[in-house]
Image (cartoon, coloured by chain):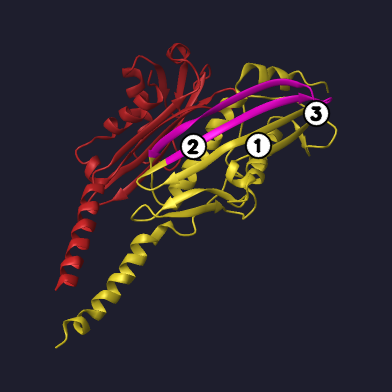
Amino acid sequence: MSMLKKLVAILAVLSGATALSGCVATHSGQLLISSEVAGKGVYYVEQSASDKRNLAAIIAERMQARGLNAKAGPDPVPNADYVVTYVDKWAWDMRMYLLDLRIELRDAKDRSIVGFGDSSQTSLAAMGKTYADVIDVALGELFKK
Amino acid sequence: MNVRRLLRPVTRLGALAAIVLLGGCAVGNRYDYSGSLTSLPVSGTGNLALSVVDARPYILSGEKKPDFIGLQRGGFGNPFDVRTASGRPMADEMRDAIAKALHNQGYTVVGATDPAPRKLELRIAEWKTDAMMHFVLHWDMTLSVYDDHGALLAKSSGSGTEEQGAGFQSHNAQSAASYFEMKFTQLARDESVRRALSAAPK
C-alpha cells in the first residue's frame, strides 16, 4: 500500500507542476539606441507576409499612442529611419490565441537590427487579452527605459 | 492476489512515463547559427580576415565538445546538451553567419591567416543557453579589429544574461539565433569598430 501512496504523491506533484505551468507569460526586449534617439525617429511598420490580421496597422497605432512617428501601409515611408518587422506565432486551445509576438526594429539604411521586444504567453495568460494588449507588452519591452 | 504483482504493469507504465517526462522534448535539441545574420551596421570593400575564437572555459578544458551550445532541461530540470545543427563547432557556425553578412556588406572575407588590411576577431568567453520554462542566455564576447601588422585598432565588449519565454526546439533555436544577431550587432555598432572597418585601405 505504501507503494500506492508513493504513486499518488508523485501524480499529485506532477499535476501541481502542470497546473502551475499553465499560466505563464514572459517578456523580453532590448534597444541598441538611446530612448532620445528612438523618440525622434520615423518608423515604417512593414506587414508580415503571413499576417492575415493586419497587426502592422495595430502596431503602428500603438506606437503612435506612445508618441512615436509610426506608419503602416503597403507603401514604405521614404524618409523612415527604422523599419519595424514582426513575427506572430499562434496556437489553438479552444480558440486561436497569440502565443508569441516578436517585434523587431531595423535600421532603414542597412536593415541591421536595432532592437526587439517579445511577448510570450500561454493559453491561460492570453485569455481576455486583445492583440493590442500583447503588442503593448512587446513595445513596452522594446522601448523600456 | 499479490498486490505487488498487480501493481507491476502500473510500475512499468510509470517508469515509461517518467522517461518521457524527464527526457521528452529535451533530448537531442540542435540550434543553427549559420544563417542568423543577414545585415550589419558596417560596410566596406576589400579583403577582411575573420576569425571566431571559442574561449569558453569548459570547451578549452575539454569538458564539453566544441559543438556544445547549452542545455535543454527535462521535466524535473534534468539537463541535456544542445548542440549545433551541423555538428560542427559552434564558433564555425557563427563565423559562417558573420562571413555571409560581411559579404552582403561588400567585404571579401578571407581566412584568419590570409593577408588582409584588417582582421576582425570575435572572442567568445561565454555563450551558453539554458532552456526549460524560460530561455536563458549567458554571454560574454569581445569584438576586436586589427591592422595588417596585428596592432589593435578597436575593441568592443559585452556580457550579461538574457531571459525570455521558452518553447519547443524550433522556438528556442530561433531565440538563440536572434540573440546572436542582436549581440553581435551590438558589438559591431561600436563607433571605433565601425571607423576601423570602414577606414580599411583598399
Quarter in which the N terminus of chain A is drawn: bottom left
Q: Chain of mark 1?
A: B
**Quadrant hosting residue B114:** top right
Query: What secondary structure is marked by label 3?
Result: loop
Q: How many tags in the picture?
A: 3
Query: Which residue is located at x 42 percent, y 13 percent?
Result: A39
Comes first in the chain, label 2 or label 1: 1
The answer to which of A51 and B53 lies nearer the viewer is B53
Name which residue type carries label 1: Ile
The answer to which of B15 and A117 lies nearer the viewer is B15
Would residue B38 appear left or right of A13 to someone viewing this image?
right
Q: Is residue B163 above or below residue B33?
A: above
The residue pinned by badge 1 equals B98
| Chain A, chosen colour in render | red
Segment colored magenta: B136-164
The residue pinned by badge 2 equals B138
Q: Nearer the viewer, mark 2 or mark 1?
A: 2
| Chain B, chosen colour in render | yellow
Q: Are marks 2 and 3 in contact (CB under 8 Å)?
A: no
